[in-house]
Image (cartoon, rainbow, N blue to C red):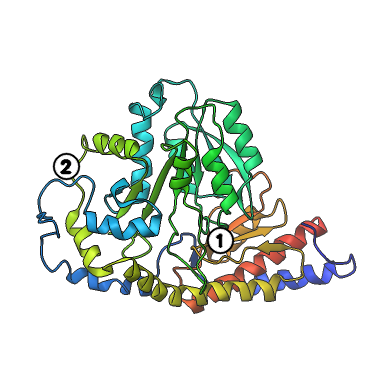
Amino acid sequence: MTTQMSDDSLPGLLDLARRDYKDLAGQGLKLDLTRGKPAPEQLDLSEGLLDLPSGHTAADGTDVRNYGGLRGLPELRAIFADVLQVPADQLLAGGNSSLEMMHDCLVHALLSVMPGAESRWADQERIVFLCPVPGYDRHFALCERFGIEMVAVPMDGSGPDMDVVERLVAEDAAVKGIWCVPKYSNPSGVSYSDETVARLARMETAAPDFRIFWDNAYAAHHLTDEPVEIADLLALCAESGHPDRAFVFGSTSKITFAGAGVGFFGSSAANVDWLTANNSKRSIGPDKVNQLRHLEFLRDAEGVRAHMDRQRALLAPKFAAVQRILSEELGGTGLATWTDPDGGYFVTLEVVEGCAKEVVRRAAEAGIVLTPAGATHPYGDDPRDATIRIAPSFPGLAELERAMHGLTVCVRLVGYEKAAGA
């Protein structure tokens, strides 16, 4: 990325940016764009959950107040089978967090032999995961927690660079997995193309126990009238002779209550049996009362879609404001590019190489807190120091607009300083 300015214009642009930053720093702002949390108004849409369930008996007669039901309520699984592209009998409904399920899958893979594996991962010399970048920092944190080596893979408009992925998985049996957010990726908003999904399903891997951690966190989180549809990974894996390859995750965390939702895991029958057997050692069953209240509140797949339309009505104006302000303040400057997602919770801002950390630091000094630069890459290391993740969901619209105007001031200041060698 190069700045589009003449040598004559740079001193004036830099002087203006410095004045704007001084004004910004004097406002005493306390604004936060760090995490992609639902706003209170979004949580209010699910307030009816607090009056549910109306009883304590599921359709099959299960008393949800008691132990048991490791796989979760069948009726709720049937609703999200449609959303997550997993047959209902191959889908587990668990506690409030899909991240918790990802954590457990890693732990169980380390400590027990998965279907198709020759040994426990803990008994192998190296375990490597591929990490499409920019990506989700909590995925990277899980790998660091368990000593799993991470290898960054570049993303493009269709998903991870499959030429790189196919080469890495074919040449090294230590490569055991890949993190994927396939629809409205965190943070780029990219949705995987049908060809990318098909190549992931059919590629040959040196490791017989290779797994795709398919974190479909934004499966229902559309920002336009035309929802993006992605290919059915689980079905394609089965068709390609790799039925156990995909671990599918999802949740209601950004659909209903972020702290009291339902997480889901879907895979082959063999993988579902493996996870259920391992989970039985740590739990006698999930919170079925919460699952029943979600079932009564959402009712069916169409109920989920209608609820998400109401969520979109709250989120879309915020994302539109981000696009408008970035275009007005940074368009044509050559100082930044940014994504315009069709769904999900984030916008990725790419600034001049070598400037992201300094932009984040200057913003913090002015009272605007951003996700740390580098969080979008393994080990917190963005080698280009250019990527900044913007999370527009939580602030009110007026607060978001103030934060975005302030952020663009910081981008201009740091970008022009770098161009001037200041």
Residue at (58, 66) in percent of width and height: 366
Place of residue 20 in the rendered image (x, y in percent of width and height, measured from the top left): 68, 73
- Horizontal arrangement in the rendering, residue 239 relative to residue 58 (left or right): right
SS for dot 2: loop
Place of residue 111 in the rendered image (x, y in percent of width and height, measured from the top left): 33, 27
Residue on which the image places disc 1: 364
- Horizontal arrangement in the rendering, residue 218 relative to residue 9 (left or right): left
Residue at (47, 48) in percent of width and height: 233
Q: Can residue 320 be seen in this view?
A: yes
Q: In this view, does 20 lie above or below 181?
A: below
| Quarter placement of the N terminus | bottom right
Residue at (54, 48) in percent of width and height: 197
Pick the residue in front: 52 or 371: 52
Amino acid type, label 2: Ile
Pick the residue in front: 12 or 200: 200
Most extreme residue toward the front, as rendered? 239
Amino acid type, label 1: Ala
- CA separation in Å, label 1 and label 2: 46 Å
- Horizontal arrangement in the rendering, residue 239 relative to residue 18 (left or right): left
Q: Is residue 235 above or below residue 165?
A: below
| Quarter placement of the C terminus | bottom right
Place of residue 345 in the rendered image (x, y in percent of width and height, measured from the top left): 49, 63
Task: Identify the disc placed on residue 258.
Answer: none
Pick the residue in front: 325 or 227: 227
How busy is the neighbourhood of tag 1: few (under 14 within 10 Å), some, or many (20 plus)?
A: some
SS for dot 1: helix
Residue on which the image places disc 2: 284
How busy is the neighbourhood of tag 2: few (under 14 within 10 Å), some, or many (20 plus)?
A: few
Q: Earlier in the sequence, mark 1 or mark 2?
A: 2
Q: In this view, does 140 lie above or below 111?
A: below
Residue at (34, 51) in percent of width and height: 87
